[in-house]
Image: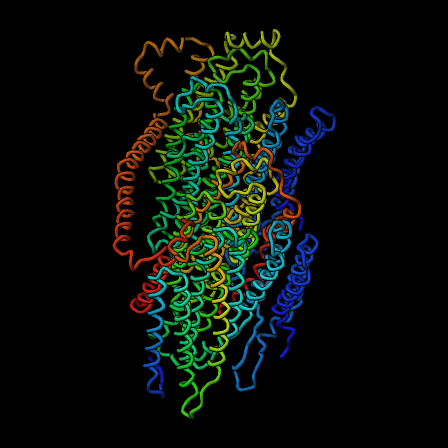
Amino acid sequence: MNVFWILPIIIPLAGAALIGILGKIAKKESASWNLVYAVIANICLLAVLGILITFYTSLGSILSTELSWNIGPDVGATFKMDHLTWWLVLVFAILGSVVSIYSIKYIDQDDRIDRYYLLLLILVAGMIGVVMSGDMLTLFIFWETMSIASYVLVAFRKEQPEPIEAGIKYLFMSAFGSVMILFGMSLAYGITGTLNIASVGTIIATKFASGLSGVHYIIIASLIIGFGVKAAIVPLHTWLPDAHPAAPSGISAMLSGVVIMTGMYGMIYTLTSFFRPTGTNIGFILLWIAVITMIVGNLLALRQNDLKRLLAFSTVLNVGFILFGLSMALTGLDQDVALISVQGGWFHIFTHALGKGLAFLAAGAIIYRIEDRGLDRMEGIGRKMPWTITALTIALLSLAGVPPLPGFWSKLNIVLAAVSSGNWQYYVGIVLFLLSSVISVVYYLIVLQKLWFSEPQEHLKDVKETPIEILIPLYVLVIVMLIVSIIPGRFEILVKQAAEVAMLL
Amino acid sequence: MALSIPFDNIYLILGFSVALLVIGLYGLTSKQNMIKFLIAIELLLDAAHLNFIAFSNIVGGNAGLVDPLPHVVVILSICVGGCVAGVALSLIIQAYRVHATLNSRRLNHLKH
Amino acid sequence: MLLESAAIMNWAIPFAGALITPIIGFIAGKLKEGSQTQKVLRIIRNWMAVFTSFVAFLFTMLLVVDVFNGQGGEAFVTNWFWNIGDKPFAAGFGVLVDPLTVLIASFASGIGTLIMIYGINYMKDDKHLDRYWFLMQMFIGGMIFLVMSNNFLQSFVGWEIVGFCSYALIGYFFDKKGPQDPKEFTIKEETEGDYNAHAGFKAFITTRIGDVMLLTGILIIFAVAGTFRYTELLSDLTWLSDLHDKKILVLTAVLIFGGPIGKSAQFPLQFWLPEAMAGPTTVSALIHAAAMVKAGIFMVVRTYPMFYLGLHDLHIENLQYYFLIVAAVGGFTALMSATMGTSATELKKVLAFSTVSQLGYMFMGLGVGGLIEPVGGVMDYNGYFAGSFHMLSHAIFKALLFLSAGAVIHAVHTKYIDEMGGLRKDMPKVFWPMLIGGLSLSGVVPLGGFFSKESIFGACWHLGEEGNNAGWIFFAVAAVAAALTFFYTIRFLGHTFGGKKTEHVEKAEKEQGGHLHKTSPLLWVPLVILAVGTIVIGFLAPVVELFMSKNDWFAAATNFTVEAFHIDYAHFFGHTFGFSPPTFWITIGILLTGCLPAYFLFVRKQWDTKEILKKSKIVNGIYTFFHRRWYMNHAIYWCLRKFKVFAEWLYENFDLKVIDRSNYIIASGTMKSGEVFRKTHTGILSVNFLYMLLGAIILIAVLLFIPF
């Protein structure tokens, strides 16, 4: 077994350990020590990014590596590194490193900064572990690693009432989700006798060739509910609008941008691997869940006054979009069309991570200056902090799907695939999809109009532009977004390979 | 259900597991105390663990062997569950300090 | 290679200019007010717009040469998405070089350049020129982008760019604080700025109705044909039969036509265009002559071969209803707007109505052309060519008319024609070009308008001769509209330049120091160029015809042969124009019918028009009816107001009373049941878990009990 392949998990964990030790050594908290932690975190994540890029050429040949106990085949911890994993780790690493730079200035007033970076690295390592694991045990362990880190990060400012309340809600609901995952896995193990996810699929396909029965549906339901809590599909989304705004803005960006998507990955990856070989049609159920998610997310976001809460609800909406695209993998529709749709779904994960991450970071920058999350208190701030609000504008326009920003390309894939699917459920769905997009534009525009076109209020008189340390990560993301807008085709190649893996082609 | 089951009492054990599941869900939906929530979560976790252990018998086959893998899963899962419980308890303590209550019903300041 | 890059450059360069403009403006704004560098920068910014449009024009001219040499076709720049099976999937990004695209791109960029030159002087006192130049360049770039595209989707993006720019430019003077013009009767707003903003908004919303129809049509076609590309749609026409089998072919065609109805201001969405005069005159000229409204014609011409082949090659008879609808909408609009033009009192509004009317002509020509049977395997080209050629000649003379109208309004500070008069001597450099433009609009021999209009008459006549009685009806409509056109042309020319100077003009002279300011060369040079163009384009008609026939992909895709054209005046008079004696003499008759009464009324002033209006109730009634634009605007606003009242009623009676009430009941009910279940029903977190459980139960039930 080649340890080289699991370096993306080991490096952040090692960095976390290093920060932990340094945090003990450094008696007093000082700015220079904080910078050291941030630099370590950032170096780790950039190293992951670098290693990842060297992986790309050999992705076709290597599929998985095993930490085996030499008992038999399929026994042991399995790690995989395919195009899909590669693509998601790329997203995590980009957003993670941006957030680690952003946090240098953003949390400099807090205590326990070493733990912040330690947890951030563990969070990223957990996420990378989830997408790299090839068997249920590994998946579960990393899932919990990621979850625990995120619970603590949500409640990071533990002296304030809001983060604690949000953290507790998040913890209990998410823990319930984890349990459901484990429950579903236990049943899947029971009917197949293996923990290896790919083998489960093949065994189910050969053993139950006649069709699915009750126990399979229980497994499907458990997995949808378990991963769905993290992915915030309706009606399992209720923790999200509490937890995402309550966290420090950098963590909000991570949670909304990528942690949610880990849940989505888990759901789609397990369901596809288990049941796609049998030719199931549960995609249609996912489609309707997606549609309900979109509608509910939209309706809740419409009247929000709290900027971060609004963005959190818009995350629910986008979860609906992504699930809509990915659901086609689990239907019996034409494979070429489904591939486009799934490709759109994975691409939307990327574009949404960029857009929502940037939006949360920019919102955090505003909050850093005025220490208030109410939109009515921010009216006219565009005149005072033009650079920050410009970044926010680009993010929101991308989320709204304005061409040629990234959000447009990913949505276009999904729409085109649904239009050519030739299935009435997708036709109805796509109408609601477009409708939701239009409604979402309404509240994005309301935000932009308030920020840009109102006269600055009295209490905003002395507000200054965001400090440069915070602006730099914002504009790194802006540049990435502009690159994607200009050459979406290059990224489509990567996503297409990922989608092929996801569809088991 | 296309299970081939050598161990006769498997349904009994699965029944216990379902009972644990139901009790856990009942606890989650109807209790107020956050500590009780935690206990409910642990019960749910145990339902899953029980499943694993029960199935390890079937998968081992007729040779009287028991598949060791589920045991590993369960042991690791108990460790992880301990971590979660630890984090949960520390959050509950902090909530008690900040909000001066253990009642989850009082933690409703965040509304939609 | 040159061909491809030219086809991209001619829209990319205006876009680039548009993006650079705000940067220059930003830098200039940071400098010290009134400093030398600032002035230089601003001059650079202004002339850059002229330069980018001109460069776009040069690139387009390269394409013209290429097309004449028989080159052209599609060039793929990049394929955004990957293939489904063997077919390139969906939205390939590319350009299509063929006579139609090059024709429109050439006049959009050429006339655009002249309008830019004109605008430098015309807009020189404005404070927000960054916005102006940005939008103008985006506008031209968007228009060229729209026409050069090789697929529906990309065209639609351009379509939206153009729509947005027009909205922003019509409402350009949204911050004018003065009171609204009291004579305006359709829109009532507090200030002039509000009126302008309202006009822009109206244009945007109205065209948006058409856009939605167009997008729906495009998506239907895509769902059936699996491609957006024009060439693929044309080379494989099975999608037409598929749609026909599903009984939605005509619906789809009409949905596609819905976009042009909105964009080109045809009945029943014609009412936004007159208010679009609220923007600067240069914008009006650009909207009416070069861009925006021509986009609608483009879309119909672009889809014309597909539907024509469907009708005459695949023999899907239902498609004749599509062509009939196009022709009927066009004919009705042409007639209706011409009558409105006879009674409008604002100079620019007369021109606006004439635009709507002339666009109606083009649609009529296209619709009629689609109905003409091919003879002996030779596709009939009359309607196709008539519509496109009228678009070209109209672009030139309408730009000329608008720009001269702008010069007149600039000089005398009024937009009402009854407040003008006697300007012939004072503004000769405006008068003569405007006269030429006006005569061309009315279709006087031998100006451009004559040939293009005559070709539409010829198409109608031809259809009639074929035995289709619709041809005669359309011919009659076209004839009456032509007579009315000449009538109002003479009317506004007579009011503006003929007769004695009115008090208003004399006042304006006094204010400017005894006589009107000299017209700046930046204003009149474009006019002269356009006037020359108007005269020349008529004689170039055979050349244009030859150019339009160089349509390789079109000919290759059809089972018909396109008749081989050559520059031949005999052929040109004999065939294409239907220039047989009857139509010619009828035209002369029509023109005299329109011209003579107008001449005596408005130039010789034989009778006092105001007296006639006072004395004769019938004439007054008709005049008011026309002047109030057939009360259509009123009707629409009435409906909107009623709808608003209804919505408020609904809000008060339904929303507040029923929904809020029920909310209240539900809320209090929940509270009460909460009281009841308090012992078992705890806290918010538990409620969340209840939601979850409910979701889980429903999910499992669906999985187990619904077959899928």
Image coords of residue C420 (percent x, y): 50, 13
Q: Residue at x 69, y 57 (%)?
A: A36
Q: Residue at x 35, y 44 (%)?
A: C321
Q: How is the image coloured?
A: rainbow
Quarter-of-image position of residue C468: top left
Mark count: 0
Residue situated furthest right in the rendering? C36
Q: Is residue A140 left or right of residue C471?
A: right
Instruction: State whether residue A432 appears in this view.
Output: no
- Establish if A401 lies above or below C541: below
Image coords of residue B102 (percent x, y): 41, 58
- Establish if C112 lies above or below B95: above
Residue situated furthest bottom in the rendering? B63
Image coords of residue C58 (percent x, y): 66, 38
Instruction: State whether residue C20 appears in this view.
Output: yes
Quarter-of-image position of residue A353: bottom right
Instruction: Tell which of C413 and A7 is nearer to you.
Output: A7
Q: Is residue C468 left or right of residue C290?
A: left
Q: Residue at x 60, y 72 (%)?
A: A60
Instruction: Tell which of A13 and A23 is nearer to you.
Output: A23
